[in-house]
Image: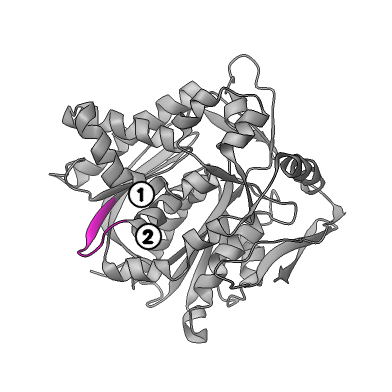
Amino acid sequence: MTLVGIEAMNVFGGSAYVDVRELMEHRQLDTSRFEQLLMSRKTVALPCEDPVTFGVNAARPILDTLSDAERNRIELLISCTESGIDFGKSVGSYLHEWLGLNRNCRTFEVKNACYAGTAGLQMAVNFVLSQVSPGAKALVVATDVSRYTVDDGGDSLTMDWAFVEPSSGAGAAAMLVSEIPEVFQLDVGANGYYGYEVMDTCRPTPDGEAGDSDLGLLSYLDCCEQTFLEYRRRVPGTDYHTSFDYLAFHTPFGGMVKGAHRTMMRKLKKAKAADIEPDFERRVLPGIRYAQHTGNMMGGSVFSSLAGIIDHGSFDTPKRIGCFSYGSGCCAEFYSGVVSRTGSDRLRRFGIEEQLGARRRLTMDQYEAVLRANDSVRFGTRNVKIEPADEVAPFGSGRRLERLVLEEIREFHREYRWAA
């Protein structure tokens, strides 16, 4: 059987952040709920950042490690986003251009809320498995930005938006998928997918969002259970507690993941609280470390969790990781793969934790100014010149690598440049 999975992966968490507790105090929210979020910081997208810049800045370090011959074998580029910048033109067209990919490359965009990244990964996996072009690679980029305002949802859409602001973030995850799965080898055929129509969270306008937080939580928990049960039907003998060394979850915020894991352990293993807490800390907590510093990355969230596990877990021997991906609306999937010491070493070369630690911290006045400035780059903007991106944070350790920034929108066309 052809091996398949993630050959290389990187996560990009932007250039700026705010402290979540400080934001909650600024908004005069009940800070006793802060601990429930299991968050520390959230990424703030600057006006010069958008889904394209996030995606390119996640993917470029991967491509820089490839030879020209390897880069030219990328024959499929899938952009996965619910933060599209055009109703027709794919974000992938910009990614393709600024990453310098071969023009003999199939390029398109996937939208399915936070499930989009997993949909793109599974599509790429099956492209490789099909062997229609032996040796070809696929690049999957899940990229999202929270820059929307809140729509009036009426009586039935009553999400507590005051507490959505501290958890909503931005970021991108890029994955090179091939038959050389050095970072994450997928368990082929071990997939439990599940979905139905539900109005838990939606974007009725390009820059607006509405939803029902209670319904969203119930749908997330339902899908977590049902996708695992379907996975177990396809892989007889699977045990939620013993079959997976680690678990990566789609992470709206860490507290939601902790609640889901607790529910699964109680339902499937009849576990008590004294057993659940250490299990959570050992198998799940490594996967929310990056989310604690970015907020909800949406399509890239589950891969941020996977990266956190690979970076902070123990891989002296190969370990199996179970992954739960959920997208509002809804569609979800439970799948798995194996990571070895090689995968851990190869991921760490991109310095994800370093990059997150090197970002610029915004004061509340600066954060409010960014929110106002972001109005200039709302969906449908025809012409605008973006102010120079000063103080764009370096990658860390004194390495000032170029980053892509949005410079101008001219007749709807987005124009970018590399900034040191």
The answer to whether any part of residue 195 appears in the image is: no
Confirm or deny contact between disc 1 and disc 2 (CB under 8 A): yes
Does residue 319 show up magenta in the picture?
yes
Whether residue 195 appears in magenta in the rendering, the answer is no
Q: Quadrant of residue 319?
A: bottom left
C-alpha separation, residue under disc 1 versus residue under disc 2: 8 Å
Q: Quadrant of the C terminus?
A: bottom right
Which dot marks residue 218?
A: none
Q: Locate residue 95, reporting x and y percent.
A: 62, 65
Task: In the rendered view, tell whether residue 189 sits above or below residue 325.
Answer: below
Q: Nearer the viewer, residue 226 or 279?
A: 279
Question: Is residue 137 shown left or right of residue 373?
Answer: left
Element carrying mark 1: helix
Specify which label sits upstream in the sequence, 1 or 2.
Answer: 1
Q: Mark 1 Cα within 10 Å, few/some/many (few <14, many 20+)? A: many
Q: Is residue 206 left or right of residue 273?
A: right
Residue at 17% x, 42% y is 239
Q: Can you say whether 237 is above or below 204 in the image?
A: below
Label number found at residue 311: 2
Choose between 404 and 84: the one closer to the eye: 404
Closer to the camera in the image, 122 or 184: 184
Q: Which residue is mark 1?
A: 286
Q: Which residues are magenta?
A: 313-321
Secondary structure of the residue carrying numbered label 2: helix
Coordinates of residue 297 in the picture (x, y in percent)? 53, 47
| Any part of residue 213 in sight | yes
The amino acid type, in three-letter code, at marker 2 is: Asp
Q: Is residue 370 above or below residue 272?
A: below
Q: Given the image, on which type of amino acid does mark 1 rest?
A: Pro
